[in-house]
Image: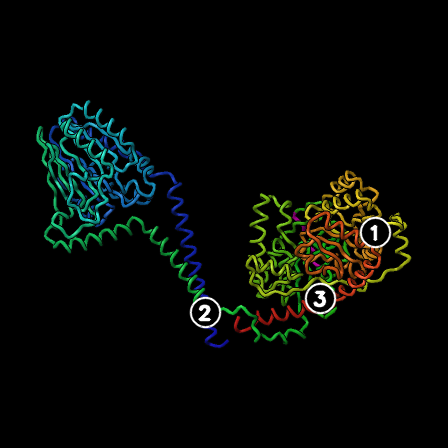
Amino acid sequence: MPRRSFLRLSRQRWLRLFFYLNLALVVGLIAHQIWLYVAEPKFESVHTLEVANIREALTERTDYRFAVVGNINNSVSVFQEEIVPLINQGSIDFLISAGNAVSGGQQESYQAIYRSLEKLNVPYLLTYGDNEDSDFGSYLFYEYFGPHFYSFVAGNSHFIFLDGTGKSSTSWQLDWLSRELAASEAQHKFLFVGLPLHNVVSDAPLFEADNYLSDPRLADGIMALAEEYGVDTVFSANLTLFSQQTVNGVDYVTTGGAGGILIDADSSFHHYVIVNVAGDNVTIAPVRLNVDSPGWWRMVTSVWSALYAFFYVSYTRFLLIVGVLTLLALRLHRLIFEDRDYYPDFDIDPTPFMGKSLRVAMVSNNYFPFVSGVSVSVDRLRNGLRALGHSLQLFVPRYREAWQDDSSIKRIPTLMAFGQKDEFRLTNPFSARFRRCLRAFKPDLIHVHHPFWLGSMGLFMGRRLKVPVIYTYHTRLEHYAHFVPLPGALFRNLISHYLIKRFSNRCQGVIVPTYSAEEYLRMIGVKTPSLVQPTGIDVARFSQVDESELDALREQLGVSASRKILISVSRISKEKNISFMLEALAELKAQGHDDFHLLLIGDGPDREAIQTQIDTLKLTSQVTLVGAVPPDRMALYYHLGDIFVFASTSETQGMVILEAMSAGLPVVAVRSSGIDDVVRQGINGFKTPQNRQAWGQKVVGLKDNAELRQQLGKQASHFAEEFDIDNFASAVASFYAEVLAKYHSSSR
C-alpha cells in the first residue's frame, strides 16, 4: 500500500476511534444525568433538622449572632474556602443564605451546594431565590430543603422567609405574612426575600436592571406590612453589591458578595453580614474580604471564581456539551473536508477474479423442502454457479422432511418452528457446527439471503474471516408486520426499513431483482454497491411439457374445456392480496363472465380463511385451491392455463410471473414494486392499480380475445428468455468479481 494511502487510512481509523470514544462519553454522561434524577436523594427536608438545631441553640437566649450571605452561587474559591472557615472560627450561631445559593436549579447544583454547606459547623437555612427556581429547580428545593416560604421562632426572634420568584401566589403570601406578623409576640422580626425591592435599592448596575423583585404588589405589600408590624430588617440578595438603608424605621439589607461575580465599584466586594442580637438591640455589619485589592482585580478574580464554580458544580454537563460539540465537529469535518466520489471506482480491475473458481458460502433462513421464492432463487443460483465451475457450500435450516442433500448442503439445528406445517424455522445462530463448517470451507465470499438470524451470523463471520459479504434483497419486510410480535405500524413504518438499511450498508454488495427495488434501497439510505439482476428461470423446462401428462392433469383436475383457465401461484397468506383477486372475480361472475376457472396454487396459514371466502362469494365452481405443487410439476400447471393472474403487492420480483411467461402465458397483475419491471404494459400482459374493476376488465379482455391472448403469450415467452439461469449466474459471478476486487484493493 502506498505510504500516502496508508497514512490517510491510519488517520481515518484514529478519527473513527476518537468519534466512538466521544460517543461513548456522551452516552455515559447522558446516563449519568438521568441517574441523578431517578436515584434516591442523599438528603431531603434539610430545613426541618436545621430549624430544630437553631431553636435548640437559641433556647432561653436573648444574645446571639448569625451570618447572612447572598449570591453564593456555589463559589468554592470564595464562599467555601474563605467565608466558611471564618464562620467556623467565629462565634456564629447559624447562617442564612439570602438567596441565589445555587448556580442553577439542576440536580448537580443542589448536590454541590449541599456539599459546600455541610462544611459549616453551624446550622444553616436557604431562601428560595431566582437561581433556586431556574431550570425546573422548584421541586428539587422543596424535596431537598423544604417549602418555598416558611417561618419559625427561635430565641426572642421571628424569622420569616418569602418566595419572591412569582412561583407562589402573591395574595396568598401577603395574607399569610399579615397573619404571621399579627400573631407574632417575638421581640425581633427578620424577613428574608431572595430579590431586592426596587424602590429601596435603585443604584444597581444597568446589566442587573432585571434582578429586582418584579411584582410591585408583593414589594409594596412587604414594605407596608414590615412598617406596620415593626420588622427589624428585610434581607435580600441577587445584586453584585452591599447596601444597607433604613426606610420608615425598617432596615433593608442587600448582600450579594458571598462568592458571586463582582463589578468595579466601591459597593461591590466579597463579604458576608453579621447580625448581632443583644437583648433589645440589633446591629448589622458586613465582614469585608479582599478590600485592599483594586476594584478591577476584584472583578477579574470574581469572574475566575464563577468559572471555577461552574466546573466544580457542572463539570459533567460541561463534558457533555464538549462531547456533543466534538461529535458535531467530527461530523462536519467528514462532510466538508473528506473527499467523496459517488461514482463507481473504474480503476478497480475485477479481471483476476473473473476466471477464478470461487468458493462461495451461501446462507439462507429457508430452503427446500420448504417451497418459497427464496428457496427457488437460492437453488437456481447455486446450480448456475456450480455449472460455471464455482464451489458452493449452502448453510440452511434443518427440516423434518428429508431432501436430496449432498455434501455441499449443511443443515443447521432448529431452535423452534412456527407457521403452517412449521415451515418457518428459527435455527441456532450460535451453532458451533455453523461456524466450524464455515471456517473449514474457507470461502472467498459469503452470500446471505436474509438480513436477520442466520443472515446476521453470516455477516458476522464475514468480518471474522475477512471476506466480503453479499446480500440479496428478496423480501419487502414491511408487508410481513402481521408475523412480528410488535405494534404493526412501528414495524411497518420504522423498524423494517431501518433493519434493511443497516444490514445492507454493512455488506459489501447488494443484489436486487428489479430497478424499483433498487430505488427503494436508495430511498431509505442504502449506499452499498448494487447489482440489479432478477432471479433466473429454467426457460427450457417451463417452455415445453409432455402433452400426455398435460392431458392427464386436465382430466385429474376436472376442469371444463369450455372455460378459460386462470393460473395464480403464491403463498396463501395475507400479504399476497388473494382476497382482492377473489372479490374481483366475484364481480365478474355477477356481470355474467362466469366462463373461467382459477387454479390457485400454493399453501399457507390463510388457506382455511381463503376457502371460506371462496364459499362466501359463491365461487366454488370457479376457483380451486390446488395446494402446494412440487417444483418439477409446475410447468404442467402453467401450460394448462390461458392467463396468469396475480394480485400481490409485497413482491420484490414476482419470479412466478417470469415462469408463467416462459410457458407462454400473458399476465394480469396489480401494479407494485416487484411487478412494474417485469410486466410490460400491452406487450407481455397488463398491470393495473389495485382496483377490482380495472383488474377485472383486463382479465375479461384477454379471456374473450384469443388473438390478443396468443400474441401477448408469444411475446411473454420471448421476454422470459432474457432471464435464463445461465445469464443470471454469469451476472452474479461478475458482480462477485467486482466486489472481491474492490474489497482487496489498496484504496479500500
* Separation of marks 2 and 1 at Cα, in angstroms: 66 Å
Residue nearer the viewer, 14 or 729 = 729
Is residue 126 found left or right of 414 in the rendered image?
left
Is residue 85 found left or right of 746 in the rendered image?
left
Provide the residue designation for mark 3: 728
Is residue 490 found left or right of 339 in the rendered image?
right
Provide the residue designation for mark 1: 565
Provide the residue designation for mark 2: 10
State which tag comes first along the sequence, 3 or 2. 2
**Which amino acid lies under the numbered mark 1 shown in the image of this protein?**
Ile
Which secondary structure, mark 3? helix
* Separation of marks 3 and 2 at Cα, in angstroms: 39 Å
* Separation of marks 1 and 3 at Cα, in angstroms: 31 Å
> What secondary structure predominates along the stretch shown in magenta?
strand
**Which amino acid lies under the numbered mark 3 shown in the image of this protein?**
Phe
Q: Residues within 10 Å of mark 3 (few under 14, many from 20)?
A: many
Measuring from the top left, give residue 610's x and y in whole percent.
75, 42
**Which amino acid lies under the numbered mark 2 shown in the image of this protein?**
Ser
Judge depth for marks 3 and 2 and give the one in front: 3
Residue nearer the viewer, 141 or 80 = 141
Judge depth for marks 2 and 1 and give the one in front: 1
Task: Look at 67% across and 52% down and name the residue there.
Answer: 650
Decide: is 14 above or below 317: below
Asked if the stretch drawn in magenta spans residue 225, the answer is: no
State which tag comes first along the sequence, 1 or 3. 1
Q: Which residues are magenta?
A: 409-415
